[in-house]
Image: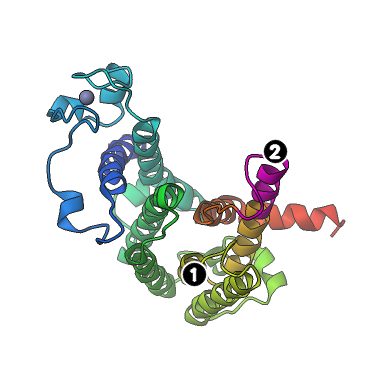
Amino acid sequence: MTPFFYLVMMFLFGTAIGSFSNVLIFRYNPDLNVFSPPHISGRSHCPKCGHNLSWYELIPVVSFLIQGGRCRSCNAKISWQYIIVELIGGSIFAGIPLFLNSFYGIAGKAFFAFSLPYWYYCLIASWILVFWVLLLITVIDLRLFIIPDELTIFLIVLGAGITFFLSQNIHGLLTPFRTSFLQQYELLLAPISSIWLSHIAGAIGGFLFFLALSILTRGRGIGFGDVKLSFALGIIFGWPDIAILSILAFIVGGLWSVGLVILGAKKMKDKVPFAPFFVVGTLLTFFFGMAIVKGYLGAFGL
Ligand SMILES: [Zn+2]
């Protein structure tokens, strides 16, 4: 089988996970854990007419398209959120291995032949889960202004896992710079050579930065849920990547809020969920961290 075939399979699997994520997101009740039985069990039905969905109405992406985005029973419109979350799920499951293999210089053939050390597969799986949890957090925060604690704790566990798996890189599968998404540019930001110290410092650094912002904005701009999330992202990314991530999240969040006030869509004291900006900061750092720092320095002729 070619790597392409495996990537298509990963994508399809990801759309099914996306479909399951929609169930978790729509049934989420803040009084219960995201993963508690009432959120997971029970058949899927149309929120309008209660019509129970058959297997052929539950095929990710395909059912939505065939039915023209409507319920087969009552013709009510189905939210675009369903298909968008399914497609994002597919993109995460195929895109993260694809990107990280290319970032670390790993051939797709070797990866899918399972000939690499176990910790590398665990590292990729952890990153897939990180982005999946961030997807859940984003949609739940957009809908309810809540970041469920159990999802933040899940991220902290994944961050500890990522730190451990990176620390297994003793035979040089990944070149030293490559543990930072800023690559050689991390040298400009006081890098910490010990993987564990770097990721613990990242957690503390992210936590303190957003705790200070939360106190300055008296919890209106940045809530304590965001402060806890910054701790989780710090242990996932380590120092100095978390510094770039935090600054990018802060800039994008600030520009967005100011833009909404100028356009008259929001007032200064209106609440804006912050988690989506953390996700934007995460995506920018993960995919473009090095290019952004390089471009920033280039603007000053460095
Ligand atoms: Zn219906």
* Mark 2 Cβ and ligand 1 under 8 Å apart: no
* Left or right: 276 in relation to 169: right
Type of the residue with mark 2: Leu
Is 42 on the left-hand or right-hand side of 98?
Answer: left
* Horizontal side of residue 105 vs 22, given as left or right: right
**Where does the image place residue 150, in percent across and percent down from the top left?**
32, 66
Q: Of callouts 1 and 2, which one flags the residue occurring earlier in the amino acid sequence?
A: 1
User: Which image quarter has ligand 1?
Assistant: top left
Percent position (x, y) of residue 118? 30, 64
Task: Work out which residue is located at the far right of the displayed protein and give it.
Answer: 301
Q: Against 17, is 239 above or below?
A: below
Specify the amino acid type for callout 1.
Phe
**Residue 46 covered by magenta stretch:** no
The local crowd at label 2, few if under 14, some if 14 to 19, many if 20 or more residues have their Cα within 10 Å, is few
Where disc 2 sits, the SS reads: loop
- Give the color scheme: rainbow, by chain, secondary structure or one colour: rainbow
Dot 2 corresponds to which residue? 263
Quarter-wise, where is residue 36 in the image? bottom left
Magenta span: 254-269
Q: Is residue 170 visible?
A: no
Residue 147 position within the rendered picture, expressed as x and y whole percent measured from the top left: 41, 60
* Mark toward the viewer: 1 or 2: 2
Q: Residues within 10 Å of mark 1 (few under 14, many from 20)?
A: some
Residue visible at 36% across and 45% down in the picture: 93
Q: Secondary structure at mark 1?
A: helix
Q: How many discs mark residues in the rendered view?
A: 2
Tell me the number on the disc at residue 224.
1
| Among the 4 quarters of the image, the one containing residue 232 | bottom left
Frontmost residue, 62 versus 239: 62
Judge by depth and name the residue closer to the eye, 179 or 242.
Answer: 242
Image quadrant occupied by the C terminus = bottom right
Residue placed at 75% from the left, 52% from the top?
A: 295
